[in-house]
Image: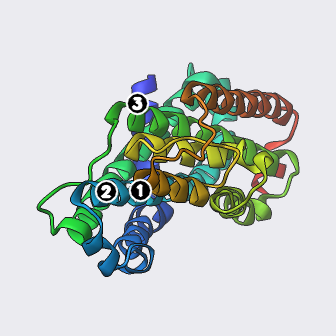
Amino acid sequence: MTTISVWRFYVKEIFRRWEFWILAIILTVFWQSTGAYIFSRYSIPLEVRQRISVEVLRKVALLYTGGWYGSAALFMLSFIAVALVHIICHSIVAVRYLSKYSRVSASKLFTGLALAALTAVFIAMFFLLGSTVVFYSHEFYDLKELLTPKNYLGIIAVTVAGGLFTYFLSMTLALLVVILKKPRMLTPISFVPIMLAFALGYTAEYAENIEIQVLPFALITRLSEHYYSNITIDITKPSVKVLIAEIKRLETSVDLLNPIDPLLVWFILIGWITLFTLISTLLFKRQKGINIEEIIG
């Protein structure tokens, strides 16, 4: 069995999971529609759109769109993680048998699974990005102009990084279920990424604490926002205040932000990915001493 065969198998497994279609795609696209057609009427009222100049409106609309894309991208990844936790946990038994009775190694199996996870992330991103452009362009310009990302390569890079983080976070949680010998806890633990996305990612939109701004959930959101709308990255302030400061700068030319180099944000995010890679590797080695009967429950 080659890595490509493993990849194909796990892509089909992910596509069979309801979490991928219902949560990662349908719910995320629906969430974007509320940002475009409901919340935008309160954040940027129609009278304000008519009063400001065309150039300022476009920048404000793009900043607003980028903010919603960043949050939605984080939730999309957390929804995919729910499916991955189940798939990885169920794969532990398969790894035991295949590595013992065939030429398939654990590294080949999990490499194929990682590639399948990235494939799923990119497909979900396609729906998310497409719905974002269509919904927000329709709301602000009736599709006469398109609010597209400023940096497509940056969006792709963040998608890859977010996919890898999601994969290793999912593996860590799945292996904890195995090591703790609590198979019945699989479903509750699989929803931990969603809870973390809300508690640490969405909260970072409003929280002043810099500690929460340097967590991977907030960093993925900040980078997604930055590459979509070219908004300044300032981890000393919550995203909402950064957006307000950006709008004030358009009006007064006064800069109230403390910009940080995106490269530094990348170093921090890569550090988090490396940390979870090491944790999942250590947990995988530890689970080898546990009987399969205890894993199955």
Which residue matches tag 1?
A: 251
For the residue pair 159 and 244, the one nearer the viewer reads as: 244
Badge 3 amino acid: Ser
| Residue 98 percent coordinates (x, y) | 61, 30
Q: Which of marks 1 and 2 is nearer the N terminus?
A: 2
Q: Nearer the viewer, mark 2 or mark 3?
A: 2
Q: In this view, does 187 lie to the left or right of 28?
A: right
The answer, for residue 208, to whether it is visible in the render is yes
Q: Distance between the residues labelled 1 and 2?
A: 8 Å
Q: Distance between the residues labelled 2 and 3?
A: 51 Å
Which residue matches tag 2?
A: 56
Q: Residue at x 74, y 60 (%)?
A: 189
For residue 9, above or below residue 181: above
Q: Residues within 10 Å of mark 3 (few under 14, many from 20)?
A: few
Badge 2 amino acid: Val
Which residue matches tag 3?
A: 5
